[in-house]
Structure formats: C-alpha cells, structure tokens
Amino acid sequence: MRKIKVGLIQQSNTADIRVNLMNLAKSIEACAAHGAQLIVLQELHNSLYFCQTENTHLFDLAEPIPGPSTGFYSELAAANKVVLVASLFEKRAPGLYHNTAVVFDRDGSIAGKYRKMHIPDDPAYFTPGDIGFEPIQTSLGKLGVLVCWDQWYPEAARLMALKGAELLIYPTAIGWESSDTDDEKARQLNAWIISQRAHAVANGLPVISVNRVGHESDPSGQTNGIQFWGNSFVAGPQGEFLAQAGNDHPENIVVEIDMERSENVRRWWPFLRDRRIDEYDGLTKRFLD
C-alpha cells in the first residue's frame, strides 16, 4: 500500500521577513522530524500579505526564479529530504510579475513551478499565469499545484486531474474583513471548504489546502485589515476530512494519505468515465447568450 506523510504549515506572519523565514525553517524541520515527506506552505509566505493595498514600492519584494528564496528553500528541502511546495512573488522581468508556486524535490532541485492563473480583484501586482495547468512530477508523484483563487474554479482542478495529478494542492491566503457579520463569516468559510472538498470528490483525488492565520492590518487604513481564517486541511478523495487546523493560531500538521485510495474511489464512482465530453463545448465560452 502506497502512503505518504504530508506536512501543512499554517503560519502567522510578521513584518520582518527574516523572522518569517526562520519560523518556516523551524516548522519544516519539525514536520520532517515527524515523518513528513511532502510539506506545503501557505501563499506568499515570506512576508505579510501585501495585496491589501497597491504600492509600487512593494514590487521590491519580488524575486527572480531561481533567486535568493529558491536557494533558501532548496537547501531546506535537501537538508530535510522532503518535497517542498513554496509560494513566491516572482519577478519575471521589469514590470512583469507573477504569483508563483515552486516545487522542490527531495534533493533540493526545482521540480517545477506554477504561475497562478486566476487573479482576483487584488491590487494589480500579478500578471495571470501563462504556463497552463500542468502537474509537476516529483519523486513522490505528480502534484497538481494551484494557488488560492484557483480553488474556486472546478475547471482548474479537472484539468490537473485529466493530466494525471495525484494530489491537488492549494497554497492560500484568505480571511475575513472585520465588517463581515458572524453569519457572513461562517458562510464564507464554509463555501471555501466545500468548494475544495468538492474538487476532491469530483476528481477522486486528495486535496491539500494551506492557509495563513492571524490578523494583518491594512497599511492604508482604509479597512480594518484581514483576519486570516486558517482552517488548513487535507481531504481524501471522497471529500472526507483527514486533518484540519484551527482558525486562530499557527499550527503544523502531519497527516498520512493513502495514495492508492483514489484508484478504489474512481472505480466506485467513475466520474471521469461518464463525462459527456461531446457536449461540453460551451465551457470554453465566457457566457452562453
């Protein structure tokens, strides 16, 4: 039976990037010490979530790939012999930036990267990705790595699954605005969880979603900032929870995933077999009118 142990690092960040990096390094080492073979970090984990406001000076946070951060995480992956999913602000060229996930194999090599395809109405820091929905081959298997806003789109998960992804992975940064009512907060959180569990069910694949946690103020003062809701989780191929973090504190989780279970689930529920691919042309249109 093929099983892997996965580490999720749900972190609360500070304005000091060096402190954030050292905290991540300690957490990666701790997860590896508990047997994690694959470790997933949250979205844009090096810094505070700078997308709350638009400030051209914040482009200075971006780095080339490869660059200083890929060197740092490459060394951590190799030292701990883990496959590591990181999330970086990529400087591709002057004036051209991406929200990019980078996957490191156990020897520290870069196995591949994914540029976030769906860009929400954040300030205009990111160019939409242009390398498609391509799973990344690693020593542990094929990883379908997507990023945050991608998690609301079933098309992205499906394309990863159709190309042979064995896991769906979402580094994330999502939370509440303080003016939201408690009922609205509950609706948002539940929708976020339900949508990703649905990707697991529809594709017969485990889903790993890692969110940041804690309050980060709005530098502009226009809002009361974001309360990142944590709740990082792993769901199995029937949408069942395998592990879930809390919503108010940093947390490392190591959980075992049975990689052979997807085969059984897809035999019981052959959704891929029963797709009417001859009738789906309309899905490539913005709207059918």
Image (cartoon, rainbow, N blue to C red):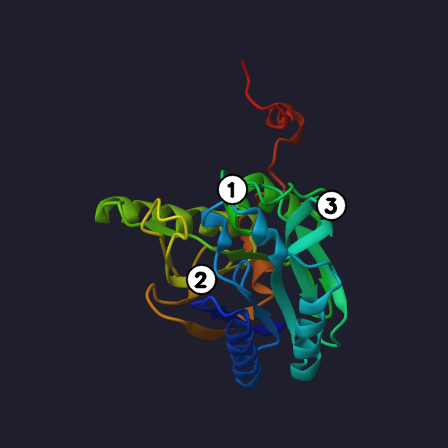
Label 3: state its secondary structure.
Answer: loop
Q: Which mark is residue 123?
A: 1
Look at discs 2 and 3 and give the one toward the viewer. Answer: 2
The label on residue 171 is: none
Label 1–label 2 contact, CB within 8 A: no
Q: Which is in the foreground here, disc 1 or disc 2?
A: 1
Of label 3 and label 1, which has the lower sequence position? 1
Q: Which residue is mark 3?
A: 131
Asked which quadrant contains residue 140, the reply is bottom right
How far, Cα to Cα, is label 3 from label 1? Answer: 22 Å
Q: Residue at x 45, y 52 (%)?
A: 197
Q: Which mark is drawn over residue 212?
A: 2
Mark 2–mark 3 CB contact (< 8 Å) = no
Crowding at dot 1, Cα within 10 Å, few <14 / some 14-19 / many 20+, comes out as few
Q: Is residue 96 left or right of residue 215?
A: right
Query: Taking 181 as reference, is 140 left or right?
Result: right
Q: Residue furthest top?
A: 289
Residue 239 at x, y = what percent? 45, 55
The answer to whether 254 is drawn above or below residue 216 in the figure is below
Quadrant for the C terminus in the image:
top right
Q: Quadrant of residue 80?
A: bottom right
Q: Is residue 28 left or right of residue 98?
A: left
Q: From where the camera sits, is residue 205 visible?
A: yes
State how far apart marks 1 and 2 are (Cα): 19 Å
Name the residue type under label 1.
Pro
